[in-house]
Image: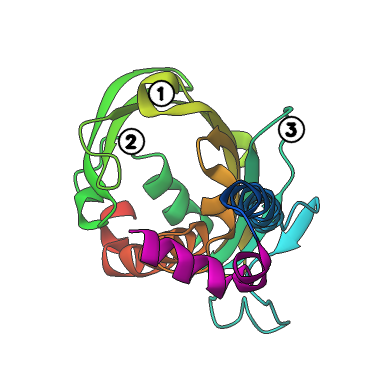
């Protein structure tokens, strides 16, 4: 173990300290001093990585003018509206008329959402006029039931939602909205969300599988394909 420690310290530039020390106390003191500086440097680097992308609206994907034409989702990171947390804006186009996609988005008792690999179960709890309560379990949070409250605004083609039990789901808050707009025979979707949980900055900026970008791209493309396959159910 001592040999391994010495090798690690040599790799980080501590070899000169060990060779030039005349006493064990001096060696320990200098090693500790160097180690503290090294650890602080690593921590500062991690903070910079985690806090990157804090501009009010910073693209995660690299959008082009033709991106919507090819139905590629556009993802932007957002500053939180509250003191802490993060947010995103997801934009994409679905090849279905607005009324068809609106019927799909407001069918809260749909039995086909389990085809989404991130959704384990989903059920409608209650609906009173324009206020809807649903419960959803996700594959990335097994055993946790997310209780969502959605307010429906048919005259605006708008859905506003909020997580009613954030603490039970390991979050501090989670809310947002989904705005639909007609674009010819297609529908433009703008999904904005704000949230806060442990490790949120890492998840937002992680560019690989398991990060926010991969999750949102899958969600958008799944809806694009899902509505095309099952459009007849919502006519």
Q: Which mark is residue 108?
A: 2
Residue 35: image location, x then y, percent: 62, 53
Residue in front for this viewpoint, 109 or 116 = 116
Residue under pointer 1: 132
The range drawn in magenta is 1-21
The secondary structure making up most of the magenta span is helix
Q: Are marks 3 and 2 in contact (CB under 8 Å)?
A: no
- The answer to which of marks 1 and 2 sits earlier in the sequence is 2
How far is mark 3 from mark 2, CA to CA?
Answer: 27 Å
* Disc number lying in front (1 or 3): 3
- The answer to which of marks 3 and 2 sits earlier in the sequence is 3
How far is mark 1 from mark 3, CA to CA?
Answer: 24 Å
Question: For the residue labelled by badge 3, is the local secondary structure a helix, a strand or a loop?
Answer: loop
**Left or right: where does residue 111 sit relative to residue 181?**
left
Q: If the image is split into quadrants, where does the N terminus sit?
A: bottom left
Residue 45: image location, x then y, percent: 68, 58
Magenta-colored stretch includes residue 8: yes
């Amino acid at each position: 173990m001592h040999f391994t420690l010495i090798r690690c310290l040599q790799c980080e530039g501590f070899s000169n300290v060990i060779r030039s020390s005349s006493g064990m106390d001096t060696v320990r003191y200098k090693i500790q001093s160097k180690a503290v500086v090294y650890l602080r440097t690593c921590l500062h680097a991690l903070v910079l990585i985690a806090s990157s992308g804090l501009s009010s609206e910073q693209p995660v994907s690299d959008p082009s003018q033709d991106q919507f034409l090819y139905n590629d989702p556009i993802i932007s990171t957002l500053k939180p509206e509250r003191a802490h947390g993060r947010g995103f804006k997801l934009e994409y186009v679905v090849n279905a008329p607005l009324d068809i996609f609106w019927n799909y988005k407001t069918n809260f008792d749909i039995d086909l959402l389990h085809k989404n690999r991130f959704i384990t179960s989903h059920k409608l709890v209650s609906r009173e006029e324009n206020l809807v309560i649903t419960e959803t379990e996700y594959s990335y949070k097994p055993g946790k039931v997310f209780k969502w409250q959605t307010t429906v605004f048919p005259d605006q083609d708008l859905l506003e939602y909020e997580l009613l039990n954030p603490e039970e789901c390991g979050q501090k808050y989670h809310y947002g909205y989904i705005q639909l707009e007609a674009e010819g025979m297609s529908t433009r979707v703008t999904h904005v969300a704000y949230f806060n949980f442990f490790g949120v900055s890492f998840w937002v900026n992680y560019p690989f599988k398991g990060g926010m970008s991969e999750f949102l791209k899958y969600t958008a493309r799944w809806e694009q394909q899902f509505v095309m396959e099952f459009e007849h159910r919502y006519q």
